[in-house]
Image (cartoon, rainbow, N blue to C red):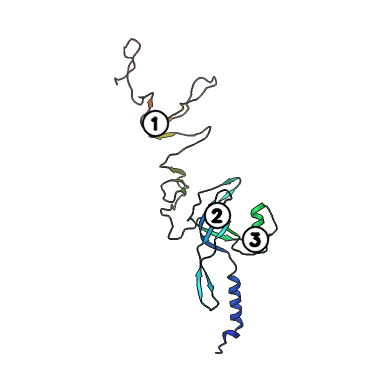
Amino acid sequence: MLQLERVDDNQEAFRLALEGHQARVWTALPGVIESFSPGAITCVVQPSIKAQVSAANGSTQWVALPLLLDCPVVFPRGGGCTLTFPVAKGDECLVVFSSRCIDAWWTAGGVQVQSEFRMHDLSDGFAIPGPFSQATKIANISTSSVQLRSNDASTYIDLNPTSQKIKIVAPGGFEVDAPTNLFTGAVTIQGLLTWLAGMAGSTASGIAATITGVINFIGSVTSNGHAIDSMHQHTNSGGSGLGGPPQ
């Protein structure tokens, strides 16, 4: 078989030229977030993959890629709603590089002309928080429900499509700030229920408070410091009992 010398091998020369071109085309890389700007919604990212460079003497070495500055952070959004979450130093992310310069779009939005003619450049990355390496992966992923959760799974909102239930686990408390709240169906409270501002309701005359439906308290119910969840004796002004078992 004829052995072609490398220097005269057109296929080898073409392959080297193609590899050299591909080496300058950036598509996507994992990275680690160095800092986050909530005002600009951008971050600085250190690419997690090193590049191999060749010296003049033919030797090679692995070097870290430069920091990627002002990478727009991708939060899921649409229809006037956005899902945001804290972005912290050390978070892993995926950086996707635009095929064309994004500078004009990033500044003004809309449809813009290219401010530069660079292509697949390290300057045009979008940071998508989320990927986990095996060194940082979280545990106890639910395989049957959707969760919005802390990484340690101590706090979460769980939506189960099979049981059609939503479960909230919040060791630090659960707060609702809304002028009105509507609960349709039975309400069960297991534990202490406290009204700091009293209980208010109205009829057509605006005088009486009215509660319609079933309220089931499992636990102690106290009014003005006195337990009212057990029967006790009432007395009239003369001191005689009006019925009921003694306290």
Quadrant holding the N terminus: bottom right
Q: Residue furthest right?
A: 113
Mark 2 or 3, closer to the camera: 2
Above/below status of 91 relative to 245:
below
Mark 1 residue element: strand
- The one nearer the camera, 130 or 55, is 55
| 10 Å crowding of disc 1: few (<14), some (14-19), many (20+) | some
- Distance in Å between CA atoms under marks 3 and 1: 62 Å
Question: Could you tell whether 206 is left or right of 186 in the image?
Answer: right
Q: Position of residue 4 (x, y in %)?
A: 57, 87
- In the image, what residue occupies the spot 58% across and 56% down? 70
Task: Tell me which amino acid carries mark 3.
Answer: Cys
Task: Tell me which amino acid carries mark 2.
Answer: Cys
Mark 3 or 1, closer to the camera: 3
Of the two numbered discs 2 and 3 on the same chain, state the one appearing first in sequence: 2
**Residue bearing the label numbered 3:** 101
**Residue bearing the label numbered 1:** 217
Q: Position of residue 130 (x, y in %)?
A: 50, 55
Q: Residue furthest left?
A: 246
Task: Tell me which amino acid carries mark 1.
Answer: Phe
Q: Marks 3 and 2: in contact by CB < 8 Å? A: no
- Distance in Å between CA atoms under marks 2 and 3: 18 Å
Res 78 label? none
Mark 3 residue element: loop
Question: Could you tell whether 116 is left or right of 161 in the image?
Answer: right
Q: Marks 1 and 3: in contact by CB < 8 Å? A: no
Q: Residue furthest front?
A: 56
- Distance in Å between CA atoms under marks 2 and 1: 50 Å
**Residue bearing the label numbered 2:** 43
| 10 Å crowding of disc 3: few (<14), some (14-19), many (20+) | many
- The one nearer the camera, 94 or 108, is 108
Above/below status of 223 relative to 59:
above
